[in-house]
Image (spheres, rainbow, N blue to C red):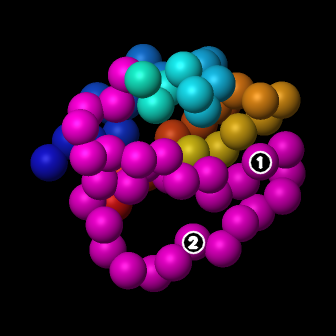
Amino acid sequence: MLTDSDFKNIVGKTINEAKEELPKGYFIFIGEEDGQSFYRPAEFNPYRINVIVKRGRINHIQGVN
């Protein structure tokens, strides 16, 4: 399973740009955007990349689960 550091290349990119670089099966979940938090379902999904977005670009990876 991949970890946060495996996805550091998507930081600074838009969601659409990042989606093009993800390995097959992985998807991006926006946990926070411009200070607004979004509900994150509690179920485990090893292919979900949780990110924080500021001004339309990925600012931080919260985790991969």
* Quadrant position of the C terminus in the picture: bottom left
Residue beneath label 1, please?
A: 33
| Image x and y of residue 57, in percent | 70, 27
Q: In this orientation, does residue 11 appear?
A: no
Give the residue type that dot 1 points to. Glu
Is residue 27 on the magenta stretch? yes
Horizontally, is 31 left or right of 8 in the view?
Answer: right
Residue 54, image quadrant:
top right
Residue 26 counted in the magenta span: yes
Residue at the (41%, 47%) spot, across then down:
27
Occupied quadrant, residue 17: top right
Where does the magenta region start and end? Answer: 21-50
In the visual, does 11 lie left or right of 21?
right
| Three-letter residue code for mark 2 | Arg
**Figure check: 25 above or below 46:** above
Residue 56, placed above or below residue 3? above
Circle 2 packing at 10 Å, graded few (<14), some (14-19), many (20+), is: few
Tell me residue 52's x, y (percent). 65, 44
The answer to whether any part of residue 48 appears in the image is: yes
For image coordinates 58% across by 28% down, the residue present is: 16
User: Dot 1: few (<14), some (14–19), or many (≥20) neighbours within 10 Å?
Assistant: some
Compared with 3, 9 (above or below) is: above
Q: Position of residue 14 (x, y in %)?
A: 64, 24
**Residue 40: mark in rendering:** 2
Residue at the far bottom: name it: 42
Instruction: Using the image, determine if residue 37 lies above or below residue 42.
Output: above
Q: What residue is rendered at 23% in x and 38% in y?
A: 24
Q: CA distance from mark 1 to mark 2?
A: 13 Å
- Percent position of residue 10, x then y: 48, 23
Q: Earlier in the sequence, mark 1 or mark 2?
A: 1
Q: Residue furthest left?
A: 1
